[in-house]
Image: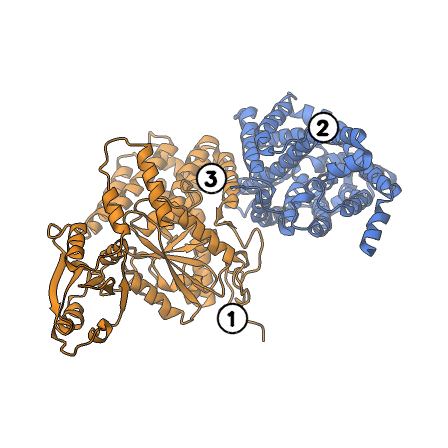
Amino acid sequence: MSQQSGKLGIREYVSIVILMVGTKPTGDLPTALYSMVQSAGWMIPLISAGIFFIPLFLLVKTMMLYQNQNLFSIIQKLFGKYIGSIVCFIIFIISSSIISIDTRTYTNIIRTFYFTTTPNLIIYSILMLVCAYGAKKGIQHIGSAAYLVVYYAVLSLIIALILSFQDSNIQGIFPFWGPGKLEILKGSSKSLYIFLDFFLFAMLIPNFQSTKDFLKGTWVAYICVCIQISAVVLVFISLFDTSLGGIAYPFHSEIRYISLGSYLPNVEIFFFVIWIMGAFIRFTAFLYINVQMFCHIFKIKDYEYLIPAIATLYLLIGSIPETPFDVGLVIKPIITNVVGPSFALISIILWLTAWLKGEFKHANNKEMV
Amino acid sequence: MKKRLFKTFFNELNKTPPYNEKSNELEIQLKEQDISTHYEQSLTTFKSIFSYPQNTDIKVREFTIRSLNRRAFIIFISTMVDHKSIQDSIVEKLIENQVPSGNIADIISYPMERTAANIGEITDYICGGVTALFIDGDSQCYIFETTKVRGRGIEKTDNEIIVKGAKESFNERVADNIGLLRKKIKNENLIVESKVISKRSRNDVFLVYEKDLVNDKLLQKIKERLDSIDSDKILDLSILEQHLEERPRSLFPTILYTERPDRAASYIEEGHIILLMSNSPSCLIMPATFWSLIHSPEDHYLRTPYGNFIRILRFAALFVAVFTSSLYIAITNYHVGMIPPDLLMAIAGTRERVPLPSIIEILMMEMAFELIREAGLRVPSPIGPTIGIVGALILGQAAVQANIISPIVIIVIALSGLSSFIISDISMNFAIRLARFLFIFAAGFLGIYGATAFFMASLFYLVSLKSFGIPYFAPMTPHSISSKDLIVRHVPFKERFRPGYLKPKDLVRQRKG
């Protein structure tokens, strides 16, 4: 009996997106933003969202031309067999390195904050094991699990933020423009990688109930997510103020800091549970997308058997850096600076090619007929 | 069809003879024939088929029909028939009738009459409690449905107890069970279809559904599944349940088993399919989702706020039953900082003298609790309460005093044990109790991270479960139209839709306005 027969509905899709992109500020993102533009860090998600809107809009528009085809098949169609395959392969390499580094970052967080004596490898391999198992179940089931988790995840995030209000100071956001408007703009263009997942979701189009779901879900989730990220960064800035630049993982510092009244001083485990649930979903979906990419490039039909191998590969790649500092401060900036602009560029070129080839006219003609 | 069945049967025999089986070819050939018109021949045939008189409850009665002046005999199984009606409306009428009439139907006043000629068919009828009348010179045999099987009456439910609402439950007589359903759904579209599923004991199953609601594909699927069962005997519905399930080794059930006719009726009205079987005081409801296994009929009988209260209570109990023990282990072993200092001191104080690690403590007490529970179930009812007292008092109190267990563990176990009773569905109850042990191991291995990782893996597993093609968490995810009767329910008149995941022929229960 086939377990992968199901299709992705709009609710499930939006849940996956919120868990994948919306949980980013619980990692090291706020620190990165703060060190870039200081007190104006909360503006960056909004402005990058504005900038990324153009390539994303063009991408979605191009995708809509072809019903039920994924990103890679369209890239190969528009760019030709050879260039297309090379572009696809580059995208796969980039997203593979992102998942390796992100999983490693999460492992570092778990180890530094909660399981200081447990070996990294054990935490890491359990993370990848669960993700591989989930990815094997197929995207519909990942979506269902995400939908069951997402309400609690968002609710707990909101509670965590509200609990920190009493000690935060809204004046931390001043000076309003931080180091200057130009710097913010520069920082925003560097931070496009926040939204790169949207680019990757175009891989999932054949798995949707209808392409309209993808269109609608993308924009709903896009708005939700950029508000969510911006709000979280804003709260962190007002809570930690200038010390945010020196805190590696502000979300975890924050949930250690807050308390439920004087009787329950340490409630971080409660938030940790829900955070890690979101993280599992995030990497499961990410892993699934990566495996789909791999299968498309090398024309493999049964992706199920590939998942454990690729998960192990990511585990090994993620284990290469020796310290969390190597991951967060040396390797990650290189990738993040490259990824955002290059994916935006690919989207725009994709649309341009389609436009020059006259695909849009074709589609119009088809509609007319 | 029948020929093919026999053919495959013989092929099976020829292929693998592990020991010398006695061939029953002669009997099978005999059963394929029609009865003979000669009185003596049919008499010997049926006497030999039923091993008369070695078989003590087979009764053969020979007599002469006076008005026709012909020899006749009736044959029946005395333990399965209604003696009085045989005597009154068949035998007496035949013997005493004076009016010469060739038509048996005019003589006998018994209401249900039919004729048959095939020996195998007649044999099956007689096994089912029917009286067969053979008359010299007739090529047909007369069949009277005199079946009267013995069993208990309709009683109160034992396992799914509710305070408000109907109390009657199914019993072992399938005719009663169908009657109970018909009593609740007075509609000509309620179909009761019967199907023979096993080869040797010839157990039959009754599919009950509403013709104008049920999705034909689903019905077809279930029928195919029933046809594909290859077994010589299926004595009970609970065994059939295991034959039908897609994942019989899974921890979680995918078919709802209930003994309440009101519950069955409400599912029929939603477009589900019900299976009944003789000798089983219950029914199977298919397909079943996670929600239907968690809900109780009382949720709907109580007024909306009360019903929702017990439902939320039940969800809380579900989490308490599964996670309390593992949470205790995780927190005391890995995340001590989470406990408020005063409480931490108290726990540490009680644990001070206990030599065992907390996971052993918990496992010991969980095992003890399960033992008490199982023992309490199996002991004869007069001793039952004593066992409970022995278990609770002696084991709990003494274990604490002997410094084997810390008192807080008793609280944890009692809480999770008590909560597990709230899930009334027996399969779900087992699933939760077993899942609890798995979570204890996961938490013992890696604290809250291990438990959460295991929880996520099981969540992935659960969402991928399907009951006859229906996802386990439908209609929550994947979403479909329903009356949103999931975690909380609406007032009854707002529940306007039948569950959309079943794709019923008529989705809307009540139109607006």
Q: In the rendered structure, which disc, 1 or 3, sits on the residue that comes first in sequence?
A: 3
Given the image, on which type of amino acid does mark 3 rest?
Answer: Pro
In the rendered image, residues at marks 3 and 2 fall on the same chain: no
Disc ID at residue A93: 2
Task: Assign a secondary structure to mark 3.
Answer: helix
Q: Is residue B214 left or right of residue A293?
A: left
Given the image, on which type of amino acid does mark 1 rest?
Answer: Phe
Picture residue at 87% right of the left edge, 39% below the top: A182
Apparent colour of chain A: blue
Q: Residues within 10 Å of mark 1 (few under 14, many from 20)?
A: few
Residue hosting label 1: B493
Q: Nearer the viewer, residue B296 or B217?
A: B217
Task: Assign a secondary structure to mark 1.
Answer: helix
Q: Is residue A149 left or right of residue B100?
A: right
Distance, label 2 to label 1, CA atoms, is 56 Å
Distance, label 3 to label 2, CA atoms, is 49 Å
Task: Assign a secondary structure to mark 2.
Answer: helix
Given the image, on which type of amino acid does mark 2 rest?
Answer: Ile
Q: Residues within 10 Å of mark 3 (few under 14, many from 20)?
A: some
Distance, label 1 to label 3, CA atoms, is 51 Å
Picture residue at 46% right of the left edge, 37% below the top: B331
Report which quarter residue B4 is drawn in.
top left
Give the orange chain's letter. B
Q: Nearer the viewer, residue B73 or B353?
A: B73
Q: What chain does badge 3 belong to?
A: B
Residue hosting label 3: B341
